[in-house]
Amino acid sequence: MSISHYIKVIGRGKDGARAIDRDQAADLFGQVLDGTVTDFEIGGFCLAMRIKGETDQEMAGFMDATHARLHKIPTGGRTAVVLPSYNGARKLPVLTPLLALLLAREGLPVVVHGTATESTRISSQNVLEALGLPAQEAIQKIAPGTVQFVPTALLCPGLQRLLDVRRVVGLRNPAHSLVKLMNACDHPAVVISSYTHPEYLLSMTATFRLVGATALLLRGTEGEPVADPRRTPAMDVFSNGEVTRVQDPQGGSLASVPGLPAPDVASTAQWIKAVLAGDAPVPAPIAQQVAHIVHLTRP
């Protein structure tokens, strides 16, 4: 098997490259995930897509290939919330674990999946472990009102390998967008997705609409799918692919949040415990995000 004929199409530079269709993208990405192509071809694919950019049809095809290979989380037929956590945090505390635990307190099953993509950042996995929720060692059914952290390598080893390419070449590839779009469960779920730059808002919106997703999309906090505790971002909800703006962005300069912890594991975990115990308030933007997600999970 080879993907060289696809690379000839997508790898002709910014102006000369052409897009491939959804079925072709699924075939290409499936070969990459299965490890049936050479490292040179994988490198060529990653660099070509980085220069060209992904279309919604291509991303949908990449998702088709990934979903066909995922070891999915059993939900018992319940609607789960899926939180992709790949960026971690550097300047602010990583509060994806707080969002997950607040949603679980509403009775929802919450799957957090991720892997460290930058060694200098604090990850959700680190904080969840400090909160007594270590990463799963095997795929297990998730119960209502609980949180699981599932490493990407458990869900799809080929996807983990592709994410690791960034450590070699220093550039993102389609896998870094795909993990923020995919449903890791065996039943329709609500995917909480985030973007870092405005152009990704457009591309992720187009992909969610094409695949008929149920999701909430916002500008993430340092790339994490949680509202910035200092200022409420815009939030868009997708229901069967139809998009609605449910939260307008808060104007003005960034505010300060009294008592927000230092961005280290111990301080963040301790502060989250205080919030859950009622000894510190839930930041208003995160409380609003929780309300939108809970509403989206209801029939």
Image (tube, rainbow, N blue to C red):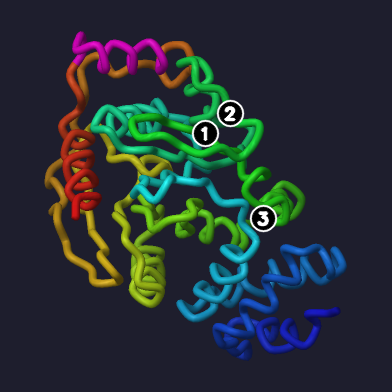
For the residue labelled by badge 1, is the local secondary structure a helix, a strand or a loop?
strand
Residue of label 2? 135
> Residue 198's spot in the image, x, y percent?
35, 62
Q: In front here: 131 or 9?
A: 131
Residue of label 1? 149
Q: CA distance from mark 1 to mark 2?
A: 5 Å
The reply to whether dot 1 and dot 2 touch (C-beta < 8 Å) is yes
Residue of label 3? 159
Q: Amino acid at mark 3?
A: Leu
Q: Amino acid at mark 2?
A: Ala
Which one is earlier in the sequence, the residue at label 2 or at label 3? 2
> Residue 55's spot in the image, x, y percent?
49, 78
Q: In front here: 71 or 98?
A: 71
Q: Residues within 10 Å of mark 1 (few under 14, many from 20)?
A: many
Q: What residue appears at the point 30 percent right and 71 percent down from the top-left corner?
A: 241
Q: Amino acid at mark 1?
A: Phe
Which range is magenta?
268-280
Depth-wise, is mark 1 or mark 3 nearer the camera? 1
Depth-wise, is mark 2 or mark 3 nearer the camera? 2
Judge whether 202 appears above or below 175 on screen.
Answer: below
